[in-house]
Image (tube, rainbow, N blue to C red):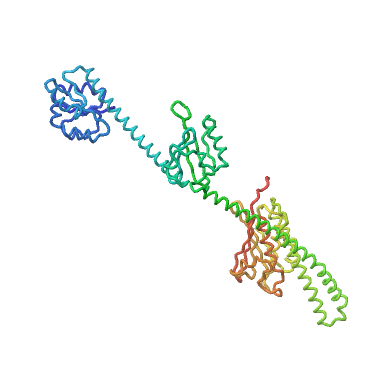
Amino acid sequence: MERLLLMLEPGENRRLLEALLAPRYEVLLGTDAAALQQAFDLLLLDGVSLKRLRAEVEARRAAEAPLLLPVLLLTTRQEVGLATAHLWQTVDEVVLLPVEKIELLAGLEVCLRARRLSREQEQLRLALADSEARYRQLVENPLVGAWEADLEGRYVFVSRRLAEMAGYTPEEVLGMSMLDRIAPEQRPWLAARLQQRRAGQLPPDVVEAELVRKDGSRFTALVAPATLYDSQGRVKGFIGLKLDISERKQLEQELARRVQELEALNRQLAAANADLETYARSIAHDLRAPLRAIQAFAAVLRDEYGAVLDATGQDYAQRIVAAAERLDTLIADLLAWSRLGTAALVPEPVALAEVVDEAQRLLAAEIAARQAEIAVALPLPRVRAHRATLLQVVLNLLSNAIKFVAPGVRPQVRLWAEARQGRVRLWVADNGIGIAPEAQERIFGVFERLHGIEAYPGTGMGLAIVRRAMERLGGAVGVESAPGEGSRFWIELPQAEEPEA
């Protein structure tokens, strides 16, 4: 509801006017300058109030600008001179008393409508100012260039950024044809697109174009053109935005070149690895044939001619047999490690409990010989792995746990599993001699041994096989240990879904 401020001398006229207006408007009453500080849409005053408060009324109207704050003067014919003096400066409308109600209400509505129109005009002005500000921000964007062209494809407007992309000033670009600024080999393509746009056959889109700078050099840009229509819906030209992507294209080309180099290096590395694997298998095969001969002849020498050999000769024969056996084991481990690098290992759900149980059966003789205690915390979950490879891993870890204990100590090994966010970690803990922190990474290397073969026999390949196997299975391996406090080895693999009961 619109608010009217009545500044009339108290009396019958003010009472009647208030009674007339109250049903239609929110009526405020006032007699001094303080009343002018209220929010209202129309001021009605008489000649006495105008003479006394003319300066304050003009100040209040000025404070409301650019909105119109209408003032209606109620006066008599005797005071019409006052109205003439201040009309259009302080007063917008004059109503001579006495007046008919309908005439007064019509005068009020005219003033209020002028107030509404001024408010709408101000809103339009602010909206236009916002629109112009957005337009300026778009056109003067330091990254993207803006342009407009006529039906012939000649520039009628370009932003400074668009001109700078090609090394021109905006004034130099105006009037140029779009066909002149594109690479010669792309001109037929652009001419066809312009024809399609003139026919209204192309929607707004984004294309990549090769453009020519003022100095003749080229750059690549993303262009987002659109068709411009007049008020009758007829095509009158084209507008668009342009972004220089030369740096990005250079980076893409450099990245593609690096990818090609890496692919070539990967191919070379794969070929070298294949050659190395073939060489390792060949060497192992070639070594095993004479090695078996050495083993056989040494065994014959020890068993059939032991009686004619003195103690030293028998010792030598036994050393030959033992050395040959160690070399055979080493070659077998080397072949196992090599095969892990090339074998196709297809993961499938594997029951971890079954693998651990089978590993214990295969090591039964060693477990019994060392009187080892093996404790397995059930249940053990299922994992995704290659069963034979996982069995080799568990065998190696169990064998080490039994082997690496101090003299006179009975091996005690514990196995348990933990679920960890879609993965399973299997722990193998022992009461062995432990591993120093600085050696806990090195022990997973090929042929790495921390102790002499006399104290703890082996080839130094067991944990290397474990690491390579886990890498091939998409898992991980690690150890927690301290000298004299035993070790806790762990392997981690993706968890498999349990079968439905």
Q: Nearer the viewer, residue 441 or 488?
A: 441
Whole-percent x and y of residue 140? 41, 43
Q: Position of residue 426 (x, y in %)?
A: 64, 58
- The answer to whether residue 185 is above or below residue 322 is above
Side (left or right) of 9 relative to 238? left
Q: Is residue 267 above or below residue 136?
A: below
Number of marks in picture: 0
The answer to whether residue 196 is above or below residue 75 is below
Image position of 31 with respect to 488: above or below: above
The quarter of the picture where the C terminus appears is top right
Look at the image and tell me in which quarter the N terminus lies.
Answer: top left
Closer-to-camera residue (184/230): 184
Based on the displayed image, in which of its 4 quarters is residue 464 positioned?
bottom right
Q: Position of residue 258 (x, y in %)?
A: 60, 55
- Tell me what residue is drawn at x 29 percent, y 29 percent: 118
Of residues 337 and 242, the one drawn nearer to the viewer in this rendering: 242
**Which image quarter: residue 493?**
bottom right
Return the x and y of residue 396 as percentages of the image width and height: 70, 63
Q: Residue furthest left?
A: 78
Point 78% across, 70% down: residue: 325
Name the side, left or right, on which 205 lies relative to 122.
right
Which residue is at the front of the view, 344 or 159? 159
